[in-house]
Image: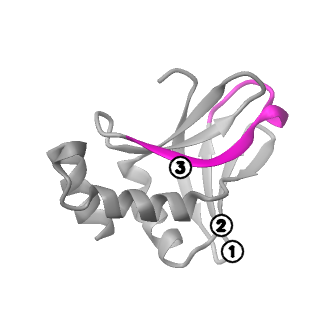
Amino acid sequence: MQNRIEILNATLSDDELRLTCETEGNEAERKPSGQMLVDSDNIAFVYILELADSFEYVMIKEHIWPELKQAHDQRKPIVLEAGNESIELSGLHEELEYLLENIKDNANYGEEMEETVKRVFL
């Protein structure tokens, strides 16, 4: 996956979960897709951002999952801080719910991914 955005930190407040990253580029062009993938090799959930002619992949790795689980349980908005812009990752809760259900007891995602998801989310 090219065009990765690595999440450095997650801050959970009463209102939302804020994901911070270091990124360059024109943030105004980024739009939430409402779609997610799984990166089993890197033990990460991947939120897809749309650009005018390509995509960026927000890598939500295991170190962020405890905060992600809390925000997901409470259905708090999840916001990416990218440069000077804040982008709400719309549809993330629905996609995450689908992926969690799919990963549970499914060896296709790899044993490590399945076990890590079970440990943190289930």
Identify which residue is drawn at 47% across, 76% down.
Answer: 73
Is 96 rendered above or below residue 52? below
State whether residue 57 is above or below residue 13: above
Q: Position of residue 40 (x, y in %)?
A: 30, 39
Q: Helix or strand or loop: what does disc 1 sit on? A: loop
Q: CA distance from mark 1 to mark 2?
A: 7 Å
Asked if residue 69 lies in the magenta stretch, the reply is no
Q: Secondary structure at mark 3?
A: strand
Question: How many residues crowd mark 1 within 10 Å: few (<14), some (14–19), many (20+)?
Answer: few
Location of residue 112 in the rendering, given as x and y in whole percent from the top left corner = 18, 46
Q: Are marks 1 and 3 in contact (CB under 8 Å)?
A: no
Query: Which residue sits at x=36%, y=50%?
Result: 62
Say what secondary structure mark 2 lies in: loop
Q: Amino acid at mark 1?
A: Asp
Nearest-to-viewer mark from 3 and 2: 2
Q: Position of residue 32 (x, y in %)?
A: 70, 46
- Depth check, front residue: 111 or 63: 111
Residue 77 is labelled as 2
* Dot placed on the residue nearer the N-terminal end, 3 or 2: 3
Going by the image, does 85 lie left or right of 59?
right
Query: Which stretch is magenta?
Result: 22-38
Q: Which residue is mark 3?
A: 9
- Does 64 appear above or below 93? above
Quarter of the image holding residue 98?
bottom left
Q: Contact, CB < 8 Å: mark 1 with mark 2?
A: yes
**First in sequence: mark 1 or mark 2?**
1
- Amino acid type at mark 2: Pro
* Mark 3 surroundings: few (<14), some (14-19) or many (≥20) residues within 10 A: few
- Dot 1 corresponds to which residue? 15
